Image: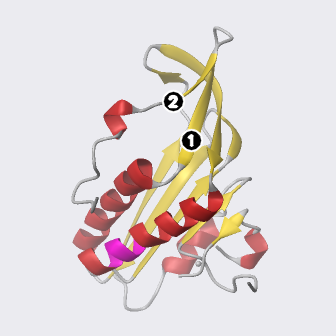
Amino acid sequence: MSPPTGPAAFALYDHALPLEQLRRSLQQPACGGYVAFEGWVRDHNEGHRVLRLEYEAFAPLACREGERILAEARQRFGITHALCAHRVGPLGIGEIAVWVGVSAAHRGECFEACRYIIDAVKHRVPIWKKEYYESGDSGWVNCEHCAAPAAGASTDAPAQSHALHTCSS
């Protein structure tokens, strides 16, 4: 597989996400709307003070399912472009763990598609989160409240950004 020349629709990164490059790749003359979502590492969860966390993924399946979700969003909402980038490995408080960007002719479909994508990624993509707590304990997060199907869900990163794993659209 040759290296990507433009952004892959879904990519995993083991370093900070290239946000400006991702955003720029969605900008097209036909698009009047752009919406992005950034998921940040927060310092608490379910009554525990979180110091840091770690993400692991089964990359081949994560990539395939992520691409499928983005294709569904393009078809369902009539958007022009959609990208999703997710971190793997260790992350500190405040770092961006996941980013979704959508562009289209109008804002409405951008908002709807962005929400659909992040909900479906959280529910369907095999990425696991381990939290490290102030108490010294740690644990893999089994997010039961995230396990409900995403709303309406059915049961390209630039080469210089060095994505850990990318897929072709």
Tell me the crowding category of disc 1: few under 14, some 14 to 19, or many 20 or more residues within 10 angstroms, Cα based. some
- Determine the main secondary structure of the stretch shown in magenta: helix
Residue 69 sits above or below residue 147 on the image: below
Please name the amino acid that badge 1 sits on: Trp
Residue 80 sits above or below residue 86 on the image: below
Check residue 93 for magenta coloring. no
Which callout, 1 or 2, points at the residue further toward the start of the chain? 1
Residue to which mark 2 is pinned: 141
Quarter of image, res 17 = bottom right
Residue 106 appears in view: no
Give how far apart the Cα atoms at labels 1 and 2 are: 7 Å
Query: Foreground: 30 or 129?
Result: 129
Residue to which mark 1 is pinned: 128
Which colouring convention does the figure follow?
secondary structure
Rendered-image quadrant of the N terminus: bottom right
Please name the amino acid that badge 2 sits on: Val
* Farthest residue, direction top: 135
Magenta residues (range)? 70-74
Give how far across and how far down residue 111 sits, in percent: 29, 63
Give how far across and how far down residue 135 sits, in percent: 64, 8
Residue 51 sits above or below residue 64 on the image: above
